[in-house]
Image: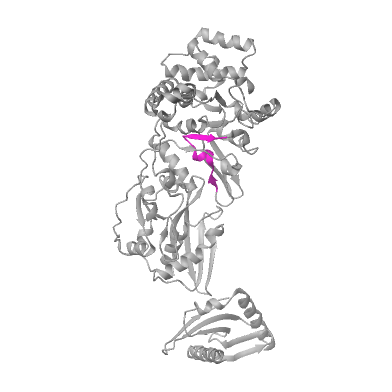
Amino acid sequence: MTIGVTHGVSLMGLAGTLVQIEVDISDGLPHYSLLGLPDLALMESRDRVRSALVNSQEKWPNKKVTVSLSPAWLPKSGSNFDLPIAVAILAAQEVIPAKRLHRAVFYGELALDGRIREARGVLPALISLLHSDVQTVIVPQANAAEAKLVSGLEIIPMENISELLKWLRTGIRVEAEEVISIEKVNGFKDLSDVAGQPDARYALEVAATGGHHILMIGPPGTGKTMLAERLPSLLPELGEKAALEVSAIHSVAGALKERGLFSKVPPFISPHHTTTRTAMVGGGSSVIKPGACSLAHNGVLFIDEAPECVSGVLDALRQPLESGEITITRAIGSATFPADFILVLAANPCPCGRLSGRGRGCSCSSLQVRRYLNRLSGPLIDRVDLRIKVEPPSRTAFASGEIGESSAVVRERVALARARAAKRFATLNISRNAEIPAFALRNEFKAERAGMSLLHNEMDRENLTARGFHKTLRLAWSIADLVEHELPLLEDVKRALALRDGMELFG
Amino acid sequence: MAKSKEAALIGEVGETLVANHLKKKGYAILARNWRIKDGEIDLVALSPNGKITFVEVKSRSSMAFGHPLEAISPDKAFRLQRLALAWLVSNSKFGADFQIDAAAVIIAPSGGIEIDYREAVL
């Protein structure tokens, strides 16, 4: 007997490692041992592989089977090693030629009848193989469209193990039907649906331009959620690389179907306020899965009723807000997922939600109101540049039936403004106004002189803290970019101050 | 009870078949169905090169319930080792070179016989 050798991929977060599977069959009592730190799902592969082979009229060796996954120190999880293990067992029995196994990777879970099941994480697994000497990857037929997003590898989708073995033995492939990729044409909700709300619309436009995080405060039913949902439609379409990155994250989370295979629409993720810390930032004991903040990568993370969030959940967002990625460490290892998103927080003005306008019907004491909004204070709110009040739409705007600007129009303006900013940042390692460091704002990124003195005066009057000073200036840059000013003029600074209406509550 | 009688018969036939198989290969059969309180050794034989060989025989009429040798659990394997030592002690051969083999015998109702003999399995 020879030793059967195949290759698979072990995923930790988005990072894949090439794993060599060796199978040795020796005389002795029938026994199966699996080496190389397998988790429970992987341990169970034995029974899946056996049934799949037997039901595909292949021989199961009733001998001592030793399967070794190397590198041995790397903990491995999941069912996607079923396929390479099955093939290696057959190779060890010399019932299939070894020649097509060379430089090939197998990825997929087996059903008991020999079908190859749809797998998670195909996209990141393939991406991680791009810089190896692997040439061919065998993936489940159900993942064919996803796999074909990656160019540079020969992708061979297979429906079941009999088909696969036929190919391994003869090189003949059952010609699969052409893959029809189901592309969501437009997942957008359009800004023109919003009646009135000129201030809020403008705030969204500025947020989209500079990548500013935003807090919306307003009574229930005034359209906070409606507005937030439309923010992705104002962002520029994702580039190839960004879209692939987003798809890869959704693939690991098993959420690629819902998103659409290769959608270039920036994602919109809105976890419920009762969500746990793990669901927000990612985690899990045997497989580390990305959380809401990574699913929102390159898009928008919307948290409604933010003050109601379980304590600690919002604080967990500090690392991604700081570095644009999140590292999750568990006993089996650590995984890093990108998490660069625009945060949109929505809150009622008070616990009962009726404190707006004349505040009629609000039953909250002033202490309750303060406590409620104070739940949002702290390091998180430090990073939120924009705070707006969302009031009920005015009667005229509501009744007139007038249709506001559509997303496409605004998106075009945002794209132009972003291009202007990008030119300015050519030498710096940043891409958006929200990321301009404080020292740069006081040096090469100052506003017009009159604007600067207005800000200094506001500081003197204690209307503005040093932090508020910098934030206002960042906003002013986005506003200036939108109206094609070379640098923020006095009027831009004034508008920026207005967009931070009431921010003194949080400094 | 008819069923278990049949099973016992298959077991006995299987052991005889394996004994003949060994004799053909030049083994001398030292004992059959050596039984003590702890259990039973199906066959004890002396190999042509002087090794004492203990054989566990599993006989079945079909593979429907899996390979016969799969029925040898780790517990059972451990017991076989103890029984082998016990046999050596009680036959004043303690310290002699020995090995434990396993044989699967499939006796199909059609009369076809298949012996799967594996050496030194434990």
Residue A404 coordinates in the image, percent (x, y): 40, 25
In front of the other: B4 or A496: A496
In front of the other: A458 or B47: A458
- Quarter holding residue A350: top right
Residue A312 coordinates in the image, percent (x, y): 64, 37
Marks counted in the figure total: 0
Left/right placement of residue B24 relative to residue B77 reads left
Tell me if residue A376 comes above or below residue A93 in the rendering.
above
State which quarter of the image contains the C terminus of chain A: top right
On the question of residue A281 being in view, the answer is no
Left/right placement of residue A196 relative to residue B72 reads left
Q: Which portion, as a residue range, is magenta? A: A288-304
Residue at image point 60% right, 9% down = A457
In front of the other: B40 or A309: A309
Magenta residue check for A372: no
Magenta residue check for A301: yes
